Amino acid sequence: MQFWKNPYKLVPVRIAEKWNEPHHNKFVNISLEFLNIEDRVGFKYLPGQFCLISDFGYGDIPMSIASSPFEGKEIFFVLDIEIEREREILSREEGAIFGIRGPLGKGYPLGKFEGRDIFIIGSGEHFPELRSLFWYLALDDERSKYGKITVVLDSNAPSLFSRKGQLPELSELSNIEINYSIESILSSDGECCDSALKLISHLVPDASKSAAAISLPLKAAKTITEHLIDIGFARENVFISLHRNIRCGVGKCGRCNVGHKFVCIDGPVFSALEIEGLVMDE
Ligand code: FES
């Protein structure tokens, strides 16, 4: 059986490259290269899905895929040097060999974005799957299926959407606008700042014809979701990634649940309608 028909099968990869985006020393990108070409060819994923990176002898680490399927043959991830298990991987040199399982979980329901203006809202630490989604939509050969893409990011996050400091000429990409919140979207207590809510309201021309993808800490994600609903978004068109809740990634530890749903199995991407009223741990 080829592994993509069994995403839990461990497949060997090597670190092809590690790099920092300018001014973001806390985050390090690693691109992984499949050792076997048939694994690479068969690895089909959607924005929002995640993988388990298996550091032999140290267990598996769930990581959201930060690359888009349209960006080329590599897949890449963004690791945080302040997280011990991620720092462990980053201590390895280029060429080091790991295992990978995936893609896992449910990605963004791309069909739901068709015919709509799309708002992508995230902060610096919660952006990998949003980056994947953005470049999927922006580089899709059938870009005209989607309406205008508006990105709202922290003021300090511009280079996190780039690749080695390079953003393709946005003027070559149609109907895209990137906005940066003047201050951080998040306040020090993890809540969403009023200025970010105002910016979002200001940017939305017709909420009934729009969809949104949010990736933020839970408290801020809830606030922004309710704000979007208040200004006219349909609950089924607001999508929230809860990938940071994932621990084991395979439905066994029971630590990722949102009400009766497991983020690792039923998510990590949920519509606001799917998780309406469910209890979520902060
Ligand atoms: S992360 Fe362990 S059950 Fe979901």
Image: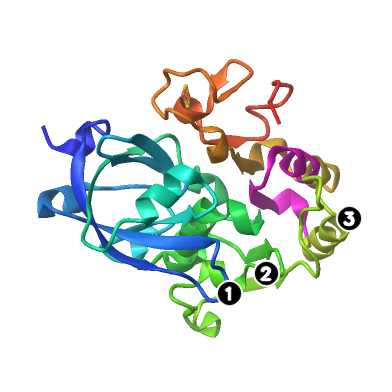
Q: Earlier in the sequence, mark 2 or mark 3?
A: 2
Q: Position of residue 141 (x, y in %)?
A: 38, 67
Q: Position of residue 178 (x, y in %)?
A: 65, 71
For disc 3, does the CB lie below 8 Å from ligand 1? no
Q: Nearer the viewer, mark 3 or mark 1?
A: 1
Residue receiving disc 1: 23
Disc 2 and disc 3 in contact, CB within 8 angstroms = no
- The residues tagged by marks 2 and 3 sit, at their Cα atoms, a distance apart of 17 Å
Disc 3 and disc 1 in contact, CB within 8 angstroms = no
Q: Nearer the viewer, mark 2 or mark 1?
A: 1
- The residues tagged by marks 3 and 1 sit, at their Cα atoms, a distance apart of 26 Å
Residue receiving disc 3: 194
Q: Is residue 132 above or below residue 44?
A: below
- Amino acid under disc 2: Asn
Q: Nearer the viewer, mark 2 or mark 3?
A: 2
Q: Is residue 207 visible?
A: yes
User: Residue at position x 42%, y 39% from top?
Assistant: 62
Asked which quadrant contains residue 279, the reply is: top right
Q: Can residue 212 be found in the magenta stretch?
A: yes
Query: Magenta residues?
Result: 206-225
Q: Secondary structure at mark 2?
A: loop
Q: Secondary structure at mark 1?
A: loop
Instruction: State the colouring used for the structure image.
Output: rainbow
- The residues tagged by marks 2 and 1 sit, at their Cα atoms, a distance apart of 9 Å
- Amino acid under disc 3: Asp
Quarter the N terminus occupies: top left
| Count of marks placed on residues | 3
Residue receiving disc 2: 156
Depth check: 125 or 70 in front? 125
